[in-house]
């Protein structure tokens, strides 16, 4: 059953200190790399979101022994050759990262695997991984006859390729790296703009050697992984919603502790600061090869900005939040070069234009972005989250900062990345959220 959550304005703002669940991208990679490594790995602060549960479930289906206690995950890795033929379809749920990275990982395993997902995942483009993996010798068939899930992967011997990717996508890059590790020869990948680099940062800890030169990565085939214990930093993409609220609601003061600050992910900090947001970074440190820090966020008079290019790539998952913040800023915000948002968990450009205009925002949908004329009050209303976790969270912030209650349909979708989102909102803002059934 679909859940409707109502978010009421937060008159006293957002106050307090938070730590976030583990970063979703890093959690996926730590479970995957541990599963194909030799030996036992412990993962601390692993995200308990639906997407990461899909990855854990996928490796259990492949015969890997994974146990969980709260946010601690224990993986008994058995090396590449320890993966078993899956006795049933591998359910990737809503998770593009699970399906795309697994495609590369399974392309050279000597068995047949069928990968499927929910309706949203079945609608997302898989040709971007099928193409290069097929060039490497993989046998991947889309049952729909096009390039969408369900996918049937029959493991084959692979050979290295040189691949120039048209999209800046960490999922594509990581899928090719995972295939390249099992291929003969060397695999080289170029991307137009550097996408998140968690794969490149984490693999050396698992004993893998790769060469990274700017936006080019080379990897020699025939490499084994060995176990490593990972501590996952807090998820900046989840923190962003709270940061946005604290910037636009008077009276707020928000401390965010232990959050990942990898430069390929901090576009949202740059955007919010360029809008004149007061965000201070404190205690910058390193955790498992990833920069981590604490943030102090205070309300600020914001103005609109223009964003495109590299900044869009570095803030790709935070654009729903940026759109809401822009509606509260003075002047116009223009987001261009963001056509990738059309193939996320929902068509996010369309979802944002429809929902925010229902709430009174002046927003224009472009083929590759949005124009938002800020400074017009957002009122309450009933809106569809399109079953997309980041749209549901962005609309929640609109509800906290606006003048009337926002009723969000399919609000349970937040569980994909942030199961305790609404309770954390309540902790920081008071009794602003109520739950019902749509
Ligand atoms: C992710 C990469 C990005 C991002 C997604 C997570 C990853 O997707 O939007 O939420 O963990 O590799 P693309 O690779 O499609 O850009």
Image (cartoon, rainbow, N blue to C red):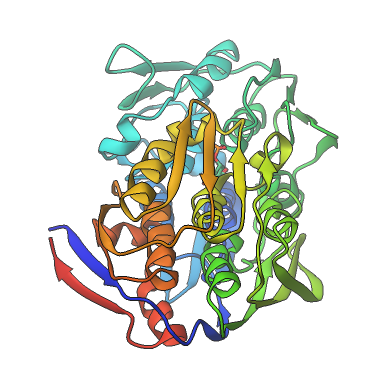
Image location of residue 260, percent across then percent down: 68, 64
Q: Residue at x 58, y 17 (%)?
A: 132
Q: Residue at x 33, y 27 (%)?
A: 149
Camera-nearest residue between 193 and 129: 193
Q: Residue furthest right?
A: 213
Q: Residue at x 44, y 66 (%)?
A: 397
Q: Identify the image quadrant of the N terminus.
A: bottom left
Residue 49 appears in the figure: no
User: Is 8 located above or below residue 316 in the figure?
Assistant: below
Image location of residue 120, percent across then percent down: 31, 37
Q: Quadrant of residue 126?
A: top left
User: Is 319 located above or below residue 73 in the figure?
Assistant: above
Looking at the rendered structure, the number of numbered marks drawn on it comes to 0
Camera-nearest residue between 219 and 269: 269
User: Is 237 located above or below residue 168 in the figure?
Assistant: below
Residue 404 appears in the figure: yes
In this picture, residue 103 sits left or right of residue 176: left
Image location of residue 123, percent across then percent down: 33, 29
Camera-nearest residue between 374 and 345: 374
Image location of residue 6, percent across then percent down: 25, 70
Camera-nearest residue between 247 and 80: 247
In this picture, residue 421 sits left or right of residue 284: left
Q: Identify the image quadrant of the C terminus.
A: bottom left
Q: Residue at x 40, y 68 (%)?
A: 402
In this picture, residue 306 sits left or right of residue 363: right
Ligand 1 found in image quarter: top right
């Amino acid at each position: 059953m679909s859940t409707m959550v109502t978010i009421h304005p937060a008159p006293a703002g957002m106050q307090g200190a938070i730590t976030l669940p583990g970063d979703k991208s890093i959690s996926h990679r730590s479970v995957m790399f541990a599963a194909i490594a030799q030996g036992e790995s412990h993962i601390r602060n692993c995200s308990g979101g639906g997407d990461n549960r899909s990855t854990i479930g996928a490796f259990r289906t492949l015969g890997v022994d994974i146990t969980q206690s709260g946010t601690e995950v224990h993986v008994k890795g058995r090396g590449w050759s320890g993966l078993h033929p899956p006795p049933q379809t591998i359910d990737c749920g809503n998770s593009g990262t699970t399906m795309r990275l697994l495609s590369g990982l399974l392309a050279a395993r000597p068995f047949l695997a069928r990968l499927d997902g929910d309706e949203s995942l079945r609608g997302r483009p898989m040709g971007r991984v099928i193409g290069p993996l097929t060039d490497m010798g993989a046998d991947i068939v889309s049952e729909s006859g096009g390039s969408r899930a369900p996918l049937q992967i029959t493991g084959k011997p692979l050979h290295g390729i040189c691949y120039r990717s048209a999209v800046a996508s960490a999922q594509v890059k990581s899928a090719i790296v995972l295939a390249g590790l099992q291929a003969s020869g060397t695999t080289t990948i170029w991307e137009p703009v550097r996408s998140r680099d968690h794969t490149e940062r984490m693999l050396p800890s698992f004993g893998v050697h790769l060469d990274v030169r700017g936006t080019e990565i080379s990897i020699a085939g025939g490499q084994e992984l060995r176990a490593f214990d990972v501590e996952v930093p807090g998820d900046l993409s989840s923190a962003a919603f709270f940061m946005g609220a604290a910037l636009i609601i008077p009276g707020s003061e928000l401390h965010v502790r232990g959050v990942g600050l990898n430069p390929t992910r901090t576009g949202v900090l740059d955007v919010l600061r360029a809008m004149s947001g007061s965000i201070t970074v404190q205690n910058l440190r390193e955790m498992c090869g990833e920069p981590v820090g604490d943030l102090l966020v205070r309300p600020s008079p914001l103005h609109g900005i223009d964003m495109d290019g590299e900044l869009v790539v570095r803030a790709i998952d935070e654009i729903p939040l940026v759109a809401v913040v822009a509606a509260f800023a003075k002047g116009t915000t223009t987001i261009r070069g963001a056509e990738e948002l059309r193939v996320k968990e929902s068509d996010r450009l369309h979802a944002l234009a429809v929902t925010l205009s229902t709430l009174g925002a002046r927003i224009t949908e472009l083929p590759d972005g949005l124009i938002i004329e800020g400074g017009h009050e957002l009122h309450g209303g009933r809106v569809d989250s399109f079953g997309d976790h980041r749209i549901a969270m962005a609309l929640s912030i609109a509800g906290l900062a606006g003048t009337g209650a926002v009723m969000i349909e399919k609000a349970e979708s937040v569980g994909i990345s942030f199961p305790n989102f609404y309770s954390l909102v309540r902790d920081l803002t008071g009794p602003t959220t109520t739950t019902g059934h749509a």
